[in-house]
Amino acid sequence: MPGLVSVKTPPDTPQLTLSVPNSQPGASSLNRPDSSPAPRTPNKKHPSPSPSRSKLSPARSAKKPAPSDSPNPPDASLDNRDLGPFLLKLVRDTIASGEGPSKALEYAIRASKSFERCAAVEGEPSLDLVMSLHVLGAIYGSLGKFEEAVPVLERAITVPELSRGTDHALAAFSGYMQLGDTYSMIGQVDKSIHCYEEGLKIQIESLGDTDPRVGETCRYLSEAHVQAMNFEKAEELSKKTLEIHRAHSEPASIEEAADRRLMALIHEAKGDYEVALEHLVLASMAMIANGQDNEVAAIDISIGNVYMSLCRYDEAVFSYQKALTVFKSSKGDNHPSVASVFVRLADLYHRTGKLRESKSYCENALRIYAKPVPGTTGEEIASGLTEISAIYESVDEPEEALKLLLKAMKLLEDKPGQQNTIAGIEARMGVMFCMLGRYEDARGSFEGAVSKLRASGERKSAFFGAVLNQMGLASVQLFKIDEAVELFEEARAILEQECGPCHQDTLGVYSNLAATYDAVGRVEDAIEILEYVLKLREEKLGIANPDFEDEKNRLAELLKEAGRGRNKKAKSLENLIDPSSKKTTAKKESSTKKWGFRI
């Protein structure tokens, strides 16, 4: 699944550096931790879960020797209650000095062990332990070791007790949000959303459901639902965010504008283009009132996209040209923002049949991406290359499109949280390899996409089902029929659940599965599928579709071979393709039937 850029975070926002919070008394508000590995919004604050012991108590200093400067004191020294704060100070100083997170990691691990021991002795939940675990998780994240950060942060959320007051609630909230960010970085979107929801519940219980900080978290969670394509839930949260900000902010505030841009994104994804356009116009007016020219230009691009979806091409061109003028004057002719407008204009002219203008804009964008200005991220370039490749693919230049997709994939390979985007690119490459007759390469691309989607928890999405269907088609071309049967069966189960039996994608998989069943000698199973498909078309979809006659002829041929007539009472979908059904082991040595597989 391609990643979506937060409408709140400007594309040129610098990456936040890892920092360790000063140990100060507990804060009274619940804000996201700045130590999160993947901040989606730039205004996250550090958790201050409890009073800390960063300064040595004079009484204890008189009784116990000061900890050694060595980062590896004997294990017995871990029982020293002053050691943990001392090591956290070393973590902060190490990072501030520019030594990098590797040395800081060593200190943070020992700090958390020390706090763990002291908490065990005291028999009380230690917020110092929670803070050290948050810091340790953040350092793991900065090193790209997100899998190692997960158990650390999971341990952190088990320590606070909400009944003990605001400090414990803050610690639990911060932990859930940081854990959600970490899951997001490894592509486990469902787990990420669950953590955000738990954090939101805690925040609402502590602050009430109309606090502005609750609004910020609602928007954060809404963005996560947009990434997961849960648009109804995203819209519900975004409406709540908008209501909270309108109650606490001045009219036409920047916060309201950001909320409306998110609402527009959701409605555009749902196909409600007029509603999306209304939100974008209001957001643009708010940004104009606040003197945010670059943000106004970014909104103009979104307005142009909606106009293009509505086939109002002249108005779309006008919006794109307005944005282009602003970006050129404020950022320069070679900025990736300029290239992004070129890509949109190339897409527009391609849709209107002006292929020469479209190709010219594509080439202009590619020149900018080839020599990016300092500060340009790999994600920005990869996104642009992917969009341009789609244009080349549609004008029957698959080789050039493949080159661009390969470049985009290489740019994203070492970027955390981009596995689903890479999987989408690999799936597109697989389709183009099939178009070129390179079925072995196609199968390899689909296999890579499937493995990444499985690892990220996307195994139940409609997109995953479609990729399995495409991989099955590539396997058929390579005469790996048994493998194709397994892929089609898995795709069928997913698409039935996600899209329903009457969806065109599901019907296509039925047809492909019937063909492969026939190819491996499972004629009865193939007949049952086709009988069910014809029953669906006759009773629910109508018989005007040209596929109806094709499927009817296929079924007649199979029935003739089996020596029986059509069963008008087809099996229900629940009983269709029983996994425990007996498979026919005999393979057909020859076949005169021509099966048309459905893409």
Image (cartoon, rainbow, N blue to C red):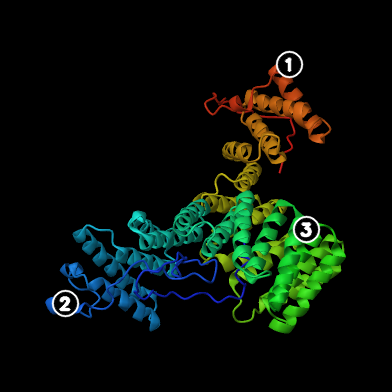
Disc 2 marks which amino acid? Ala
Residue behind mark 1: 565
Judging depth in this view, the residue of 108 and 557 nearest the camera is 108
Up-down relation of residue 358 to residue 183 (above or below): below
Q: Residue at x 46, y 58 (%)?
A: 203
**Residue ID at (84%, 32%):** 544
Which sits in the foreground, 322 or 27? 27
Classify 378 as above or below 125: below
Quarter of the image with the C terminus is top right
Mark 3 burial class by Cα count in 10 Å: few <14, some 14-19, many 20+: few
SS at circle 3: helix
| Quarter assignment of residue 64 | bottom left
Where residue 569 sits, quadrant-wise, is top right
Is tag 2's residue or tag 1's residue first in the polypeptide sequence? 2
Name the residue rendered at 76%, 63% in the picture: 305
Say which element carries label 2: helix
Q: Which residue is mark 3?
A: 394
Q: Residues within 10 Å of mark 2 (few under 14, many from 20)?
A: few
Q: Position of residue 521 (x, y in %)?
A: 62, 27
Q: Residue furthest top?
A: 564
Side of 116 where 433 appears, left or right: right
**Residue nearest the observer in this picture, 97 or 373:** 97
What residue would you read off at disc 2? 59
Work out whether residue 71 can be spotted. Answer: yes
Residue 1 seen from this side: no
- Rendered-image quadrant of the N terminus: bottom right
Q: Position of residue 178 (x, y in %)?
A: 44, 62
Looking at the rendered structure, the kind of residue marked 3 is: Ser
Which x, y percent locates residue 403? 67, 65
Q: Tell which tag, 2 or 1, sits nearer the viewer.
A: 2
Residue 386: give its label: none
Q: What amino acid is labelled 1 in the image?
A: Gly
